[in-house]
Amino acid sequence: MRYLLRKFGEFNGLNVPAVISNIRDLIGKEIILEHRYKDVLEFDDLIIIQNYNRYNSRELVSTVLKFRKKNIGKLIYLPGPFNPYDFPTLFYLGVDILDTSFIDAMGDRNCIYPTGINKGENCREWNKNLLNKIMKEIEISLKTYNFRELVEFYSNTAFSQEILRLLDMEYYNEIKQFIDHEPRNLSSSGIESIFRPEFREYRERVMNFRSKANNLLLIPCSAIKPYSMSKSHRVLHSFIGKYLKYIDEVIVTSPLGLVPREIESFYPAAYYDIPVTGYWFEEEKKMLRETAESYFRNKKYDKVFYILPEGEDVILDIFEEKIGIKGKLNAENSSKLQQLMEKELVRSKVNKRKVEIINIISYHYGIVLNDENMKIVDQGNRELVYINDTVFAKITKNGPYPMMGLAQYLASNGIKVIKIRESVKSSNIFMPVVEDISNDVRPGDLVIVLNNEKIEGFGYAAISKYDLDYLRRGIAVRDFKRLQ
């Protein structure tokens, strides 16, 4: 979990994640005999888990997470013969230090391959080079924020697959506290990505969205992000543009599930990539259906329209009545949809943009607003939102920026708040002046900065609550701006 917090490199005098060949490399001496049979050895900055069940993945995950959660600021060493192909997953689990005992046991005639152990010559050098290669890839992936992708890539052993699935399926509530919202490209290469914490959290964040119109339109995603910039979506809008004010557009996709049009340019909807084959695995179909059932449970529509290819159309079963085309999103089917809408669309006046803004603010801050007494002023590339004649937020393609109304609401409710001890003059706020952080803050979040309980301004969080326990330096808030 430390590496989900992006905490790597020099830590307590050691460059982590690390691989050692002897315990003396770590503590400067051998472990005395009477301590070798203890389950756990604890030092000031180090925990050595000595007694664990290597062959029970569920027990191993539970053991490591128990110590990781209690000791965020300490290094964890898990001695034992682990295959280098399992190292990325073990580091992802929260281990900081592993050793070369598995490679040492292979000797010079057993070479380690992705498919198993094969007899060969000069295997000691081969295995050492393999370990160095994997560790270098781990280092690069941590710096480029693609560590999860590397973990999935190397999860080709039963051991790694078990650990990753247990983390995703049974420890999601623990893991999601350590993910962040800093925009970066997310590559989805397989079924494991459906349960990736970032995507599961995304699905949770959209569940309370309000319907924006009395007609629903379900359409497939596109390789181009945001979707509205793609040829297929632009062609669709060229046919049905005059009806959009009456339509609640929702994009169907894996591994996210559903993407309401108003948040298509935000993270992670605009930052993921998937292999497009036209084939959907049963796990994907199950995720789509369950997501749709939850998302649409309390939403009512006069008409449900769709253009969906095979696989994605599984979600249509939750609607009693629907009108549309099963197939690709292209000019021919867009024209057919236009003709259907001309006959079937229910034209009811709804202030769609107000609801979209309510959903956008809900997505970023987890608060639900009422559209009563809301006024929107269009300023070209941005919109100013007023509530009760007080300027509340500024909406851009990058998201909602707090103005005094939203800042006061968040501050008074302790939402997305970082408290500092003294006023700052620079565009970055550093750790030494941070006093407290609300539990909901994740790196990448737009947060309100309070100084002596007064609103100082806003900026992007570079830390979370957990960082306060052991970080003493570094940036806490970047791109800080004062609120007048």
Image: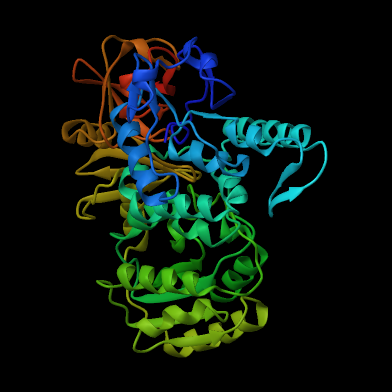
On-image quarter of the N terminus: top left
* Number of marks in the rendered image: 0
The one nearer the camera, 43 or 167, is: 43
Hey, which quadrant is residue 470 in on the image? top left
The one nearer the camera, 481 or 345, is: 481
Say whether residue 403 is visible: no
**Residue 90 at x, y percent in the picture:** 49, 39
Vertical placement of residue 57 versus 458, above or below: below
Vertical placement of residue 59 versus 402, above or below: below
The one nearer the camera, 346 or 15, is: 15
**Residue 402 at x, y percent in the picture:** 33, 35
Q: Left or right: where does residue 89 sit relative to residue 136?
A: left
Vertical placement of residue 144 versus 286, above or below: above
**Residue 288 at x, y percent in the picture:** 43, 70
Say whether residue 449 is visible: yes
Hey, which quadrant is residue 230 in on the image? bottom right
Q: Left or right: where does residue 187 sit relative to residue 92?
A: right
Question: Which residue is painted at 44% across and 54% down in the image?
Answer: 199
